Amino acid sequence: MKNTSMRTFKTLTKGAALVVLSVVVACTGVQDTATGPTPIPKAVRVNAGDVAVVIASPGGFCVNRATITENANGAFMFLSDCRVVASTGQAGRIPISAILTASISPTGLAGSENGMKAALGTLGQFLATPVGVFSLGKSQVNGAVSILQTKQTDTALYLLVEDVAFSDNAGVSSRYWRAFTEVNGRLVALSVTGYSDADPDEKRSLRIIRDFMQAIVDANTATS
């Protein structure tokens, strides 16, 4: 399972740069780690465009700090399965069931000053164009990517994406959920990719990405 997990990380890393926003982070500290700094914290505080944003993981997942990258443009990180031992408060790795990513832009969602719902609608319209759809893919193959479902709330946009040219030896699904919102004036893009056999309808992945979104919103509300 260890080798499979590493292959999965390497495969998904190749597609990570194709998230519709080219983002990165500067990791300034660790939050909500019961025993202090750890390689797999439940949440980290990052800085994007001189604004602090907390990326908090949904239940059953932790941030993999080794995957955090940073540059002048923003921030990016992977999250994967973990289990927190109640007696010690320490998190440990467990076999991977899904790969999560979080990206933070140094700028906000375009048009959000006129209302989040309308701005997310405009973003959804762009992502439905050929250029937008291509940007959501992992394979970088023209015509391979399609949006299967779109769900929008007043504060978030969710897209179920399929990239038929994407494959790996670990059984990672060619379908995955993307989500977009604005937190503390910064555009945040999330993704959840599961395994084809374990979640053929992507229902678990949708539940995870919604919980992921809520965890981030709650963490930043608590620290504001």
Image (cartoon, rainbow, N blue to C red):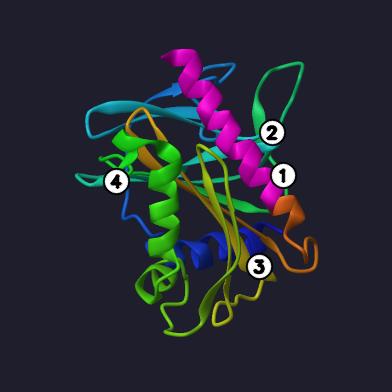
Note whether 51 is above or below 208 in the view shown: above
Point out residue 90 in the picture as x, y percentages from the top left corner: 65, 24
Please state the extent of the stretch shown in magenta in the rendering.
206-224
Any mark on residue 110, and which?
4
Q: Could you tell me the amino acid type at mark 3?
A: Val
Report the disc number at residue 94: 1
Circle nearer the viewer, 1 or 2: 2
Q: Does the magenta stretch include residue 218?
A: yes
Chain-order first, disc 1 or disc 2: 2
Nearest the eye: 73 or 115: 115
Local secondary structure at mark 1 = loop
Please report whichever mark, 3 or 4, sits nearer to the chain's N-terminal start.
Answer: 4
Residue at horizontal 45%, vertical 57%? Answer: 124
Q: Is mark 2 on a helix, strand or loop?
A: loop
Tell me the residue that label 2 is attached to. Answer: 59
Q: In which quarter of the image is residue 58?
A: top right
Q: In the rendered structure, which amino acid carries the disc numbered 4?
A: Ala
Contact (CB < 8 A) between labels 4 and 2? no
